Image (cartoon, grey):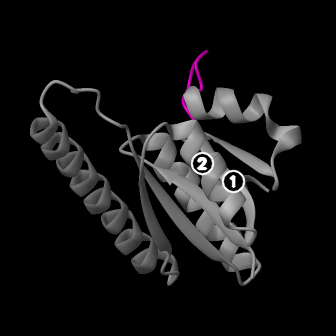
Amino acid sequence: MRVFLVVMDETKEARCSLRYASRRAAAVDGAVHILALVPQQNVSAFGAVQATIEQEARDRAEVLAHGAAGNLLAESGIMPAISVRVGNAQAMVKEFLAEHEEVAALVLGAAAGNNPGPLVTHFSAQAGNLPCPLYIVPEGYDEMAEKRTD
């Protein structure tokens, strides 16, 4: 089964990439996997405070991912798998891809303007070294609008 990996956060471009991935998955009888990333906190002086901050960030990421999954299920009938990882975003995505050979494509949303975002910038430079194709979805991309003009 082809799995489309989407890195989810609170941005509009992430929602666009999730819609794009769900349409591709539906077209090929594939699946979607949402990866929610939580940045590691650097509050080393107070370990309990750091742990609390990280847990709250992880909880927010899980709520976001589950909300996106619910919306995706309602829109397309696809129930995605969800993973939440704590750490450096680029490293976590690379690690996830190395562990999951079933991923057929990494789908990232690009922000409008001259700065598409740190993940798009990083992985577009690494595209030839990735174990799967990289799909970059521009912010605001609407496949349905494109089909209406054909």
| Residue 39 % position (x, y) | 37, 37
Say the numbered circle drawn on residue 134.
none
Q: Which stretch did the figure color magenta?
A: 110-117
Q: Is residue 49 magenta?
A: no
Q: Main secondary structure of the magenta part?
A: loop
Badge 2 crowding class, 10 Å Cα cut-off, few under 14, some 14 to 19, many 20 or more, is many
Q: Are marks 1 and 2 in contact (CB under 8 Å)?
A: yes
| Residue 19 % position (x, y) | 55, 60
Describe the element under mark 2 as helix, strand or loop: helix
Locate the N terminus by quadrant: bottom right
Quadrant in which residue 128 is drawn: top right
Say the numbered circle drawn on residue 106.
1
| Residue 72 % position (x, y) | 45, 71
Give amino acid for label 1: Leu
The answer, for residue 119, to whether it is visible in the render is yes
Say the numbered circle drawn on residue 93.
2
Question: In the image, 135: left or right of 62?
Answer: right
Q: How many marks?
A: 2
Describe the element under mark 1 as helix, strand or loop: strand
Spatial CA span between label 1 and label 2: 9 Å
The answer, for residue 139, to whether it is visible in the render is no
Q: Classify 79 as above or below 140.
A: below
**Nearest to the observer: residue 146 or residue 27:** 27
**Nearest to the observer: residue 111 or residue 35:** 35
Give amino acid for label 2: Val
- Which residue is at a point 81% across and 47% down the rendered structure image? 130
Question: In the image, 55: left or right of 28?
Answer: left
Please identify the residue farthest to the right as the structure is shown: 128
Quadrant in which residue 136 is drawn: top right
